[in-house]
Image (tube, rainbow, N blue to C red):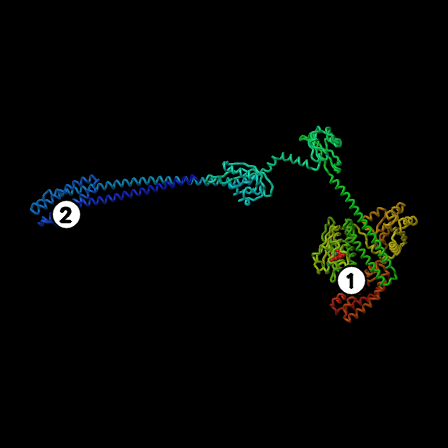
């Protein structure tokens, strides 16, 4: 740069000098030409004056001549002064040509000749006045002529002299101008050459500069890139430490981005001490002018962690030669640094760790000298480090030495690890230690000592003890809970069994009036409801206790669904709701799974749908959601939809929780415990299924659940057998059965049930009594209660079996405990029935146990065999639990009451009294259904609905007539059926 400036300066100087030269040259030329022209003017003036002298002389001579010729004595006045003018003029000329010697010489001669001529003329003039002829002669005399010629000659000589002088001057000037021109050309030429040279030089300098700048830029770029790649930070800072540029890597090393750092002071990264030290150091670098310095220091990154870095700082100078900035390269040396300090650092840490670890530790060398013991060792052993280190066991006077020395010997002998547990008591506190001793080896695998570690597991030992205690307590609690469940089950279910059983027996009494029958029916229904609640609570407790075990047995899914829906459809009908059910034909008939739970879930959901729907309909749809034919697994989807009160979306989750209902008055208004959905959900999830509800308030509800099943390829038991039993007259006819039961009511229930079924039945109230009876008499079957005072059912059974008696024994228990059946079988019993039992269940089990198939049902489904297809008595049989006597009574009652109700209804239609008509139609709907007239019942339902809504009133009478026609058409068939009962 400097060079360029100098060169440019030289160039300017040269141009300036050249310019000055030209100006000077012009000035000189101008000056010379001015003096030349002055000279010419002056010379011409002189020449003119000299000529004027000749002319004046001529005039004077002529004047004299004219005077003489005209014979005058005077001349024109103007001619008199001519001689003086000639003299003056000459004088003037001579004065002006003082320095010109050649001219002076001529002028002197001219003066002489002029004066001679003047004198001669004056002579003539003066003569003329006196002697004119002489005067004339004088004029024509030669002298005058000669003088005039001389004068003319001198004038011409003067003119020639001056002309020569002028020419010489012009020649001289020409030569001068030529030289000047030549010089100027030469100077210009040299200047041009110089200019060209300088320009080239400057151009080259610029090129070089550009090249250098480029190279510098590239170098800086590659340097920056290198810096980025080598994980270096490159930065520049002002002398005062403010960052002016920072490479991108800064973010990685410091946590600050390059942009964030620009404008910040480097002290941002330093603690106070380091800042002070570096400040001093770099000020000193600036002072001494050290080009490069290296410093290692710790920076604090943005996250607050400390990092060792090495910084190379180079000074960058400005144009003025002063330090302009620092250019620095920073390298992360944290890892190296820490590695450098590692051994020391590790040693200290290791010591600290060893000292503060909760385990005891020692290291011995091969001769048995202690090299290291940690704090815990000294604490537990009650020694100081200095007393132990460097000594062998033999030199130590402590009790514990003898206790542990054999272990060390063992390690030395076996060169293998040994372990032992030990309890050490310090200040009355027991510490549990797991002591591990093992050989220490060098890199070549040679044994160089023993290391012993005593791991303190006092807390763990205490914890284990506490856990064991807690487990024992928990187990006790579980046992207590199970006992409670068992007892509750027993205590409640046993009397329930009594109530239901006795009600059943009561309902078998022929002499009951219809209202008595109705009351006993109500007792049975209430008892059954109560039992449902108890069962729900028990179920829920079992699920929560993880005690509910699912069956995985074959069943007919169509049958399970039909059985579940049958009573529900009736309920729906009685409530005036339509009920639709649909099973996808792709659903296979036989599945493996838990039919009881399926029934339970379906019943609960459909019951809810009916319960919470006041108008409209309930629908149930079953579909095959997916099937894996290879694995024979499938998933069924069950949709239960109603048009009832619906559930607000925010309560969808709530209703699946235990004891939760959408309205506080639900229990009172609709009954229920709030457990049904919770149980259903648990049961579905236990079977790996899912359930959800879709509903809005007042817009009905749609519950949907999916359950996985396995296709059943094997045979399936014919459940109808069991169902049919209720229609068989004396299924146990001729069988001898012993009932061992301590509860009096149950004794009666079982006794009457069996006896009514045709069995010859003995009852004893204790295990002991049972034993005596079997000695005395042989039975086809023994019904054995489990919980009895004295000998319980298990013990009695075992005693019977010990006697070698193989009579079929059916356990009868109210216990809901899981594993009860297994315990009974284990004790030697053959089957198990829970209280309260279903009669047909009991009969089925007895007959199955005795190896007898279920007898052909001669009176099988009386309704179907005896009534034409128009009549269906299934409802009445279901209601009366298959008791023909009761069916008979009920049907007789209906034959009596239905016609009366018809006439009442007719009257009400006449009177257009719709509300009472609606109530009557409601009853009629039920009565006709019970009487087997389903079709008529359906029509009655439409009357009930329209009368209530007061719609389609004009068609009520024809519909009533239609019902009556159906009834009277079939009344004789009902009578026939009554006769057969
Ligand atoms: P419960 O019926 O014994 O009260 P659930 O667990 O079966 O108990 O049902 C819990 C609550 O969910 C019910 O009390 C009722 O508020 C609501 N619920 C269940 N099913 C329906 C339904 N189909 N329509 C409207 N509400 C229902």
Q: In the shown orientation, is residue 88 left or right of residue 258? A: left
Give the mark nearest the N terminus, 2 or 1: 2
Q: In the shown orientation, is residue 242 left or right of residue 734? A: left
Quadrant of residue 36 within the rendered picture: top left
Q: Which structural element holds mark 2?
A: loop
* Residue 668 point in image, percent of width and height: 77, 59
Q: Is residue 682 above or below residue 228?
A: below
- In the picture of the structure, the residue carrying the numbered disc 2 is 81
Q: Which structural element holds mark 1?
A: helix
Figure quadrant, ligand 1: bottom right
For the N terminus, give its image quadrant: top left
- In the picture of the structure, the residue carrying the numbered disc 1 is 574
Q: Please give the count of numbered marks on the rendered protein.
A: 2
Quadrant of residue 534 within the rendered picture: bottom right
Q: Are marks 2 and 1 in contact (CB under 8 Å)?
A: no
* Residue 962 point in image, percent of width and height: 78, 67
Q: Is residue 582 above or below residue 207?
A: below
Foreground residue among 767 and 929? 767
Quadrant of residue 374 within the rendered picture: top right
């Amino acid at each position: 740069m400097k060079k360029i400036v100098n060169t440019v300066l030289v160039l300017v100087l040269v141009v300036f000098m050249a310019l000055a030269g030209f100006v000077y040259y012009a000035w000189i030329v101008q000056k010379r030409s001015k003096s030349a022209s002055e000279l010419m003017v002056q010379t011409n003036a002189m020449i003119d004056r000299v000529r004027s002298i000749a002319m004046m002389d001529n005039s004077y001579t002529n004047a004299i001549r004219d005077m003489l010729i005209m014979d005058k004595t005077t001349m024109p006045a103007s001619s008199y002064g001519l001689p003086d003018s000639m003299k003056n003029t000459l004088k003037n000329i001579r004065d002006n040509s003082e320095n010109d010697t050649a001219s002076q010489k001529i002028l002197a001669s001219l003066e002489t000749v002029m004066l001679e001529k003047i004198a001669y003329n004056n002579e003539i003039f003066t003569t003329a006045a006196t002697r004119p002829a002489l005067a004339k002669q004088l004029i024509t005399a030669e002298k005058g002529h000669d003088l005039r010629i001389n004068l003319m000659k001198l004038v011409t000589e003067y003119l020639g002299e001056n002309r020569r002088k002028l020419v010489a001057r012009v020649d001289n000037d020409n030569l001068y101008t030529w030289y000047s021109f030549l010089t100027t050309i030469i100077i210009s030429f040299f200047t041009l050459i110089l200019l060209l040279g300088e320009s080239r030089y400057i151009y080259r300098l610029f090129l070089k500069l550009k090249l250098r700048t480029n190279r510098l830029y590239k170098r800086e770029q590659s340097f920056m890139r290198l810096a980025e790649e080598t994980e270096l930070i490159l930065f520049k800072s002002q002398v005062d430490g403010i960052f002016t540029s920072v490479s991108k890597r800064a973010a990685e090393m410091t946590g600050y981005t390059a942009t964030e750092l620009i404008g910040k002071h480097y002290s941002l990264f330093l603690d106070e001490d380091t800042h002070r030290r570096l400040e001093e150091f770099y000020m000193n670098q600036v002072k001494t002018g050290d080009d490069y310095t290296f410093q290692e220091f710790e920076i604090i990154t943005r996250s607050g962690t400390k990092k060792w870095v090495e910084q190379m700082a180079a000074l960058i100078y400005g144009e003025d030669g002063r330090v302009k900035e620092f250019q620095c390269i920073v390298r992360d040396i944290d890892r190296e640094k820490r590695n450098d300090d590692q051994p020391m650092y590790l040693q200290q840490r290791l010591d600290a760790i060893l000292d503060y670890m909760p385990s005891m530790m020692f290291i011995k060398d091969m001769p048995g000298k202690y090299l290291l013991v940690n704090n815990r060792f000294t604490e537990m052993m009650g020694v100081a480090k200095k007393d132990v280190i460097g000594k062998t066991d033999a030199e130590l006077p402590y009790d514990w030495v003898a206790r542990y020395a054999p272990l060390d010997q063992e390690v030395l002998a076996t060169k293998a690890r040994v372990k032992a547990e030990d309890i050490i008591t310090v200040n009355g506190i027991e510490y549990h230690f797991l002591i591990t001793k093992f050989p220490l080896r060098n890199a070549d695998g040679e044994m160089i000592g023993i290391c012993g570690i005593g791991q303190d597991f006092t807390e763990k030992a205490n914890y284990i003890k506490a856990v064991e205690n807690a487990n024992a307590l928990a187990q006790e609690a579980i046992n207590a809970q199970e006992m409670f469940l068992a007892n509750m089950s027993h205590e409640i279910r046993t009397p329930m069994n009594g109530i239901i059983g006795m009600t059943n027996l009561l309902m078998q009494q022929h002499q009951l009036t219809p209202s008595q029958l109705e009351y006993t029916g109500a007792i049975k229904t209430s008892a059954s409801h109560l039992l449902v609640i108890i069962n729900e609570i028990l179920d829920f407790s079992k699920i929560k206790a993880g005690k509910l075990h699912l069956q995985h047995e074959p069943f007919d899914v169509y049958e399970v669904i039909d059985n579940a829906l049958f009573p529900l459809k009736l309920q729906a009908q009685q409530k005036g709701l339509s009920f639709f059910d649909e099973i996808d034909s792709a659903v296979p008939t036989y599945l493996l799974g838990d039919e009881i739970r399926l029934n339970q879930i379906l019943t609960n959901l459909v019951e809810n749908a009916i319960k919470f729907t006041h108008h409209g309909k309930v629908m149930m749809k079953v579909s095959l959601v997916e099937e894996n034919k290879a694995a024979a697994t499938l998933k069924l989807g069950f949709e239960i939809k109603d048009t009832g009160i619906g559930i607000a979306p925010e309560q969808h989750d709530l209703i699946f929780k235990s004891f939760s209902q959408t309205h506080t008055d639900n229990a009172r208004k609709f009954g229920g415990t709030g457990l049904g959905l919770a149980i259903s959900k648990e049961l579905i999830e236990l079977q790996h299924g899912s359930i959800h509800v879709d509903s809005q308030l007042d817009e009905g509800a749609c519950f949907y659940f999916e359950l996985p099943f396995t296709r059943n390829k094997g045979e399936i038991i014919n459940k109808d057998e069991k169902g049919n039993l209720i229609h068989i007259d004396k299924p146990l006819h001729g069988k001898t059965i012993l009932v061992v039961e301590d509860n009096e009511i149950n004794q009666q229930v079982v006794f009457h049930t069996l006896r009514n079924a045709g069995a010859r039945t003995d009852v004893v109230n204790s295990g002991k009594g049972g034993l005596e009876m079997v000695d005395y008499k042989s039975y086809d079957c023994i019904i054995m209660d489990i919980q009895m005072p004295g000998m319980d059912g298990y013990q009695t059974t075992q005693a019977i079996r010990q006697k070698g008696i193989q009579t079929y024994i059916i356990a009868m228990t109210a216990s809901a405990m899981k594993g009860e059946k297994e315990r009974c079988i284990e004790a030697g019993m053959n089957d198990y029935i829970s209280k309260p039992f279903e009669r047909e269940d009991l009969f089925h089990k007895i007959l199955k146990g005795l190896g007898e198939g279920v007898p052909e049902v001669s009176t099988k489904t009386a309704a179907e065999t005896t009534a034409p297809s128009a009549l269906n008595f299934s409802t009445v049989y279901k209601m009366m639990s298959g008791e023909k006597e009761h069916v008979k009574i009920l049907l007789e009652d209906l034959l009596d009451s239905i016609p009366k109700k018809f006439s009442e209804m007719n009257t009400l239609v006449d009177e257009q009294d719709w509300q009472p008509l609606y109530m009557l139609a409601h009853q009629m709907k039920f009565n006709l259904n019970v009487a087997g007239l389903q079709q008529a019942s359906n029509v009655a339902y439409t009357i009930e609905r329209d009368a209530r809504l007061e719609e389609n009133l004009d068609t009520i009478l024809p519909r009533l007539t239609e019902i009556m026609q159906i009834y009277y058409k079939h009344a004789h068939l009902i009578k026939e059926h009554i006769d057969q009962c």
